Image (cartoon, rainbow, N blue to C red):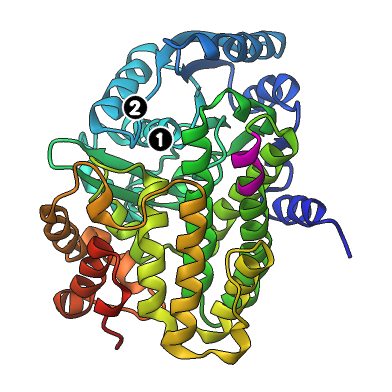
Amino acid sequence: MPDIKEKAKAILREFKGDTYAFGSGVLDEAAGKFAAQLGKKAILVGPIDFEWFQPTKERILKSLDKAGVEVLDIARSAKPNAPFVDVYRIHSHIVHKHPDLVVVAEGGSSIDATKAAAVLATLGDIQPEIDPFFGVGQVTTVCQESGRSIMPVLAIMMAASSGAHLTKYSNISDPVIGQKKLIVDEAIVPPRCIFDYDLTTTQPMSLTLDGGLDGIAHCLEVYLGSAGDSVARARKVAEVGLELIIQGLTAVKKNPEDVEARTLLGLGTDLGGYAIMIGGTSGAHLTSFSLVDVLSHGRACALMNPYYTVFFAPGIEDKLRVIGALYRKYGYIEKDLDSLSGRELGLEVAEGMVKFSKFLDFPTCLRDVPGVTEEHIERALKAAKDPQLDMKLRNMPVPLHAGLVEEFMRPILEAAWAGEFEKIKNM
C-alpha cells in the first residue's frame, strides 16, 4: 500500500499538474520560472517589516532576477484575516506601478488580500469597491461582460493553513463590524503557486496549530457536505488530508522542530485546499466569520465543528465512521464506533474532536475565549441570514435557509457557548 505522503503527492499532481511546485526546497528555482511564465514586470508583496522574512525575500528576488523578471516595487502584506484596508493598500501599489503580475509570499490572509487587490486592479474602473464581488461568481460575470482576465498572481504559501494559494476563495474582513465576507470565484485562482514546506519553520507555533486546524475544517466540512458524484472524490482527498494533519499536529505539538511533521502538515493542508475546490465548507466556517475579532480562523473552526457535527450526525452516519476511525487511530476516541448510530455516533466523534483540541491547548467552548460575548452569537445569526453567505447554509449536510436559522442554528451556538452538546436540536 503506498505511503500516505506519496498518496497525497499523487492527488496534488492530479489537481494542479505542472502549475504547482511543492515540497522541500522548491522555492529557489520555481519562483523565477513561474513568474517568467506570467510576465516580465512584477510587484512583490510580503511581510517586509519582519526580520525572519528577509532571507526568504532575498531568495525570491534572486530567483526573479535570474529569470529576467524586473521587480518594480515591494509592498507590505496584509494583517491576519485580510482587512479591507490592506486590500486597498496593495491595490494602490498595483495601479501606480503597472506590473504584469503580483508575487505574494506569506500566509493565507496576505494571499487572499492580494487576490482581491488584483480583482480591483483589473476591474476597478467598472466596480471601484470590493463589496459587489462578494458571493459566488461575481468576478467571472464582470470579466465576461468586459472581456478581461484578472491580473495574474504568483502565490507563494509560507504557512500550512488555508490553501489560499490553490483556490477560488478570498476571505476579506471588515474590522469595524467584526465580520468576514467571501469571494468565491474560479477567476481568482492563482495561475501559478509554490509551497516550499521548509518555509513553515519560520512561523510561530500558534500559527502552525491554527493553520493545521483550518486544514482539518476544510477536509471535514467538504466531505461531510458532499453528495452524489462528489462523495467518492471528497472522501479520497479528505481521508488522506485529515490523517496527515492529525498525525502532523500531534507530532509538531510534541516537537516543533520536527521537519517531517512540517511536510505532513503542508501536504495535508494542501489537500484541504483541494477539498474546497471539490465542495464548500459550511457551518463552522460561517460562524467563524463572525468571530474574527476574538479568535483566529483555525481556532474558531476547530471550536465550532464538534457542535455542528452533532447537529448533522443523523444524516451522515457513514461519513462519521470514516472520520471517527481516524481520530480513534491516533488515540482521541476509545469506543467502538460500529456499535453507535445517529446522534450517539455524532456525540462520540465530537468528543474525539474536543479531546484533540484540548491536547493542542485550544478552547472548546465560546465562553472560555477572552473577549467573546453573547453579542457574538447574535452577530453570527445575523450573518447566517446574509444572502452573500447563503452558500454556507446550503453546503451543510443538513441544509438550512435563513428562515430556519433561529430554530436550529441558535441552539448550536448556545451549545458552543456553554460546552453543552445536549442543547443541540436535531432536525
Q: Which of 278 and 271 is in front in this view?
A: 271
In the image: residue 122, left or right of residue 36 = left
Name the kind of residue labelled 1 in the image.
Ser
Per the image, is 254 magenta? yes
Q: Residues within 10 Å of mark 1 (few under 14, many from 20)?
A: many
* Magenta-colored segment: predominant secondary structure: helix
Question: Which mark is on residue 79?
Answer: 2
Tell me which residue sits at (23%, 51%) in the image.
290
- Regarding residue 269, the answer to whether it shows in the image is yes
- Of the 4 image quadrants, the one containing the C terminus is bottom left
Name the kind of residue labelled 2 in the image.
Lys
Q: Do the residues labelled 1 and 2 touch (CB within 8 Å)?
A: yes
Q: Position of residue 68 (x, y in %)?
A: 67, 11
Q: Give the range drawn in magenta.
A: 250-255
Tell me which residue sits at (35%, 44%) in the image.
171
Q: Position of residue 188 (x, y in %)?
A: 45, 43
The image quadrant that residue 303 belongs to is: bottom left
Cα separation between marks 1 and 2:
7 Å
The image quadrant that residue 73 belongs to is: top left
Residue 298, placed above or below residue 380: above
In the image: residue 228, left or right of residue 297 = right
Tell me which residue sits at (63%, 32%) in the image.
256
Residue 57, placed above or below residue 12: above
Question: Which mark is on residue 109?
Answer: 1
Q: Mark 1 falls on what kind of element? A: helix
- Of the 4 image quadrants, the one containing the N terminus is bottom right
In the image: residue 206, left or right of residue 247 = left
Q: Position of residue 389 (x, y in %)?
A: 26, 60
